[in-house]
Image (cartoon, coloured by chain):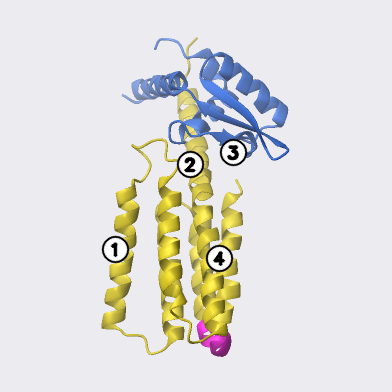
């Protein structure tokens, strides 16, 4: 049995297409639990600080919970060590983000809680958009774009209810995004 | 490889193998997700999976999540190797044509 070169080239294209689709669906599926976790954290954190304005320290507990949860989800069930991200990569990424945000706050100190509440989601949105673009993850990129627009929109147009807006719409968008990414 | 592997050479089975090869090794893919990725019907996909499984290229695991049955599949080492050989075979044909 011989295969004509055109047929071989066509088969290689089919393979590439199927692999890209499968790898993208797999990546999105693995990403979705992180969105559920952080969506829940945003709802609790933003709603908590809206209801009790003095309780912003709640974030000091929620952020480490989220980081540890993300670290745990990212490192479990990684069967292929050559392709999966290893634990130190997650830890180093979390540390780099923490240092970046700390440096940013030191250089450009926010004047209000709402500014902090908007700045970090905008950075998260930027991160999702960039990751989505570079990994061809259209849904992750769109989620980042939506999150950025919703955050900036709420900050400027609903300043009085911004924290509530971020709890419902920001946290809700993350959770809905998580369900969306689970679909093939 | 002088001849294409007849198990993988079939276009639908090639798609299935390619989709599974894109996952990290030992990672399983649920039947329903694989069906959506390769765009086949339940019956068609099921029949091809049996053929690939009988060749030793794929493992099928069936269990229940609550009361709902779940079928998961993954490539075996032999399956990954056979797929890589098949891709190399195709590349060789394309390379010979262009050189």
- Inter-mark Cα distance, 3 to 1: 35 Å
Classify residue A52 by image quadrant.
Answer: bottom right
Mark 4 surroundings: few (<14), some (14-19) or many (≥20) residues within 10 A: some
Q: Residue at x 38, y 42 (%)?
A: A84
Magenta-drawn stretch contains A147: no
- Asked if labels 1 and 2 touch by Cβ distance under 8 angstroms, the answer is no
- Inter-mark Cα distance, 4 to 2: 27 Å
Which mark is nearer the camera, 3 or 1?
A: 1
- Marks 3, 2 in one chain: no
Q: Colour of chain A?
A: yellow
* SS for dot 4: helix
Mark 2 surroundings: few (<14), some (14-19) or many (≥20) residues within 10 A: some
- Inter-mark Cα distance, 2 to 1: 27 Å
- Asked if labels 2 and 3 touch by Cβ distance under 8 angstroms, the answer is no
- Marks 4, 1 in one chain: yes
Classify residue B70 by image quadrant.
Answer: top right
According to the picture, the residue beneath numbered tag 2 turns out to be A23
According to the picture, the residue beneath numbered tag 3 turns out to be B37
* SS for dot 2: helix
- How far across and down, in percent of the image, does residue A31 sit? 49, 52
According to the picture, the residue beneath numbered tag 1 turns out to be A96
User: If you read the primary sequence from the N terminus, does the residue marked by circle 4 or circle 2 appear first?
Assistant: 2
Q: Give the range drawn in magenta.
A: A154-162
According to the picture, the residue beneath numbered tag 4 turns out to be A40
The chain painted blue is: B
């Amino acid at each position: 049995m011989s295969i004509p070169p055109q047929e071989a080239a066509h088969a290689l294209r089919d393979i590439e297409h199927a692999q890209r689709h499968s790898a993208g669906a797999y990546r999105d599926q693995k990403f979705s639990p992180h969105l559920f976790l952080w969506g829940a954290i945003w709802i609790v954190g933003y709603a908590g600080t809206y209801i009790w304005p003095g309780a912003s320290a709640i974030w000091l507990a929620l952020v480490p919970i989220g980081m540890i949860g993300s670290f745990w989800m990212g490192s479990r069930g990684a069967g292929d060590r050559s392709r999966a991200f290893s634990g130190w990569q997650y830890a180093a990424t979390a540390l780099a983000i923490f240092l970046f945000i700390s440096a940013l706050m030191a250089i450009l100190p926010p004047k209000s809680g709402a500014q902090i509440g908007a700045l970090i989601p905008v950075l998260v949105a930027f991160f999702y958009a960039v990751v989505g673009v570079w990994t061809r993850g259209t849904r992750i990129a769109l989620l980042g774009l939506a999150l950025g627009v919703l955050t900036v929109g709420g900050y400027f147009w609903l300043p009085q209810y911004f924290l509530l807006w971020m709890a419902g719409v920001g946290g809700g968008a993350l959770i809905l995004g998580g369900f969306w990414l689970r679909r093939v | 490889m002088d001849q294409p592997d007849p198990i993988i050479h079939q276009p639908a089975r090639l798609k299935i193998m390619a989709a599974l090869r894109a996952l990290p090794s030992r990672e399983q893919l649920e039947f329903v997700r694989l069906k959506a990725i390769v765009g086949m019907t339940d019956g068609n996909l099921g029949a091809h999976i049996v053929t690939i499984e009988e060749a030793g290229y794929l493992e099928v695991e069936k269990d229940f999540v609550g009361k709902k049955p779940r079928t998961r599949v993954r490539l075996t080492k032999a399956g990954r190797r056979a797929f890589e050989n098949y891709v190399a075979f195709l590349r060789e044909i394309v390379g010979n044509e262009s050189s």
